[in-house]
Image (spheres, grey):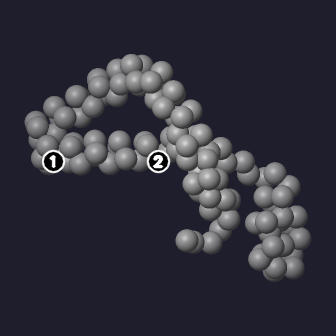
Amino acid sequence: MAKNAVDSGQFEHLQPEMNAAGAIEIKPNLVLMEKRGQKAFSVWSRFIAQGGAVESTGRKIRVHIFMYLLPTAIFVLSPLLWVVSKIMLIVMHKKLNKEVAYHMQNGLR
């Protein structure tokens, strides 16, 4: 399939053909988890960056807080977030399916 596209120089139908052949599978729950992770890490990165320069004491303290808080939060919040994710999958089913469809193609929104 890909070799034929390369040989012929015709790539416009390659992505839909590969999707139809099952070349990629995107799970809605992973899309939801990725969005949640992006939000959380953007908050933490801002918090750490506001601690000062790379070698500053304030920044090192914030990195250490993050190092200990992240594993703790994962173990404590994981069961709760699992339940919330199941509910969100039901509530946001149509929106998540649109996100999955978007990620399975090569164009932009």
Task: Report the residue that reaches farthest toward the front.
Answer: 91
Q: Amino acid at mark 2?
A: Lys
Q: Quadrant of residue 48?
A: top left
- Report the Cα–Cα distance between label 1 and label 2: 23 Å
Q: Which residue appears at 19% of the width and 35% of the height?
A: 62
Rendered position, 80 above or below 50: above
Question: Tag 1's secondary structure?
Answer: loop
The residue nearer to you, when weighing 5 against 90, is: 90
Q: Is residue 74 left or right of residue 24?
A: left
The residue carrying mark 2 is 35
Rendered position, 70 above or below 36: above
Q: Nearer the viewer, mark 1 or mark 2?
A: 2
Q: Which residue appears at 57% of the width and 72% of the height?
A: 108
Q: Which mark is residue 50?
A: 1
Query: Quick one: quadrant of the N terminus?
Result: bottom right
Check disc 2: other Cα within 10 Å, few if <14, some if 14-19, many if 20+: few
Q: Is residue 36 visible?
A: yes
Check disc 1: other Cα within 10 Å, few if <14, some if 14-19, many if 20+: few
Q: Which residue appears at 29% of the width and 25% of the height?
A: 69
Q: Which mark is residue 90?
A: none
Image spot of residue 56 (x, y percent): 11, 41
Rendered position, 6 above or below 35: below
Image spot of residue 6 (x, y percent): 82, 73
